[in-house]
């Protein structure tokens, strides 16, 4: 079975394109309802439980889904792990956030209000 995890704030609807739907055996996972999780590890545990992800599965994670998929990989013996537009290590995220902060434009509302697109 192939489990596909969306990015932050998204759900399985982000995979409605024919290219995603053509993946045989894919299960498009929605995020679990928030239950007080404060770490990626806790989110990974909830996703494993909700989606019933077994050993031997293949995971595809986009953005935050990729980060959670990496954490799931530390808990399950996976057949394969595929990351799409995702960080692998915390240091990558920290560097990206630092670079955005340095520009003074990390907030999309700020960008829109300045007239830039």
Image: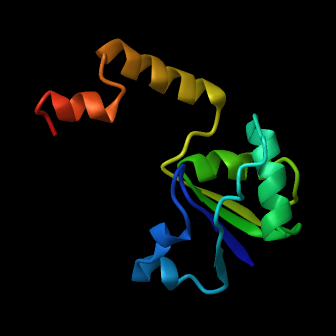
Residue 78 x, y percent position in the rendering: 81, 62
Across and down, in percent, residue 21 comes to 50, 83
Which quadrant of the rendered structure holds the C terminus? top left
At 62% from the left and 39% from the top, the residue drawn is: 88
Q: Residue at x 50, y 21 (%)?
A: 95
Q: Depth check: 6 or 111 in front?
A: 111
Answer above or below: position of 62 versus 89: below
Image spot of residue 74 (x, y percent): 84, 47
| Residue lying at 35% horizontally and 29% vertically, measured from the top left | 107
Q: Residue furthest top?
A: 102
**What residue lies at 69% left-to-right and 48% top-to-bottom?**
68
Q: Residue furthest left?
A: 115
Query: How many numbered marks are there?
Result: 0
Q: Is residue 97 left or right of residue 47?
A: left
Residue 73 showing in the rendered view: no
Q: Is residue 35 above or below residue 106?
A: below
Check the picture and name the quadrant holding the N terminus.
bottom right
Vertical order, 53 against 44 (above or below): below
The quadrant holding residue 42 is top right
> In which quadrant of the rendered view does residue 103 lie?
top left
Q: In the image, residue 20 lies at what x, y percent?
A: 49, 76
Specify whether 102 is left or right of 89: left
Specify the color scheme: rainbow
Q: Quick check: can you spot residue 43?
A: yes
Is the residue 96 above or below the residue 75 in the image?
Answer: above
């Amino acid at each position: 079975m192939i489990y596909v995890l969306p990015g932050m704030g998204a759900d399985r609807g982000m995979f409605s394109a024919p290219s995603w739907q053509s993946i045989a055996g894919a299960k498009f996972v929605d995020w679990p309802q928030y239950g007080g999780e404060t770490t990626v590890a806790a989110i990974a545990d909830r996703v494993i439980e909700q989606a019933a992800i077994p050993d031997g599965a293949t995971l595809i994670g986009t953005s935050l889904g990729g980060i959670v998929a990496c954490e799931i990989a530390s808990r399950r013996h996976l057949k394969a792990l595929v990351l799409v537009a995702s960080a692998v290590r915390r240091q990558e995220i920290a560097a990206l956030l630092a670079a955005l902060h340095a520009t003074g434009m990390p907030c999309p509302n700020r960008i829109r209000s300045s007239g830039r697109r």
